[in-house]
Amino acid sequence: MEPEKVIITFLKWLTENPSIFMPTAWQDLPKLETEIAESADDEIFPIAMTISKWCSKQGLGETLRDKVRKDIDDGGEPTPTTMQPLTNITQVLRQSIEDRYKKLQQELDAENQSNTDNDSK
């Protein structure tokens, strides 16, 4: 699989299609963030492998492979003019994971608060 496509697909899932992740996957996001933090920005292949392994553990390995293959088949190989450069990828991934995780926690807190309010009536 193309490492850049893996990273871009994961980022899109995280920001545009978070429902693809099961609840247990959300609990494991901080661990993924920590693993990504151990990589340097220029280590795109190891970062993509970390994401691929994490997705496999979450039951999304085949979905990721299919999506990456489909993107390559549909659009051909990315060229420097059609693909945005992956700069500060470690920071971007970590920030995206952290933001999505915080948003999920806020949603869960709001849902729990709503359930508590309904229980007290």
Image (cartoon, rainbow, N blue to C red):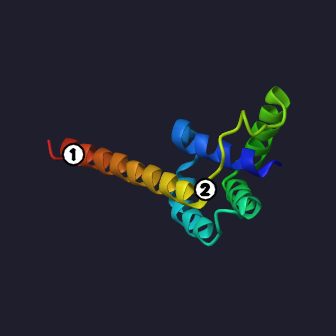
Residue 53 in the image: state x and y as whole percent.
73, 60
Residue 3 in the image: state x and y as whole percent.
76, 52
Give the residue at the far front of this rendering.
Answer: 81
Residue 41 in the image: state x and y as whole percent.
64, 63
Task: Place residue 75 in its image quadrant.
Answer: top right
Question: In terms of sequence position, does the residue under pointer 1 or pointer 2 come before the other?
Answer: 2
Q: Which residue is mark 1?
A: 119
At 61% from the left and 69% from the top, the residue drawn is 35
Depth check, mark 1 against mark 2: the one in front is 2
Q: Which residue is mark 2?
A: 89
Task: Place residue 37 in its image quadrant.
Answer: bottom right
Residue 24 appears in the picture as rendered: no
At 38% from the left and 53% from the top, the residue drawn is 105
Looking at the rendered image, the quarter that the C terminus falls into is top left
- Residue toward you, 29 or 113: 29
Numbered marks: total: 2
Q: From the viewer's perspective, tell me whether residue 121 is left or right of residue 8.
A: left
At 54% from the left and 36% from the top, the residue drawn is 16
Name the residue type under label 1: Asp
Name the residue type under label 2: Ile
Element under disc 2: helix
Task: Place residue 117 in its image quadrant.
Answer: top left
Q: From the viewer's perspective, tell me whether residue 10 is left or right of residue 81.
A: left
Q: Residues within 10 Å of mark 2 (few under 14, many from 20)?
A: many
- Residue toward you, 63 or 44: 44
Q: Residues within 10 Å of mark 1 (few under 14, many from 20)?
A: few
Q: From the viewer's perspective, tell me whether residue 75 is left or right of residue 16.
A: right
Residue 30 in the image: state x and y as whole percent.
51, 64
- Residue toward you, 121 or 61: 61
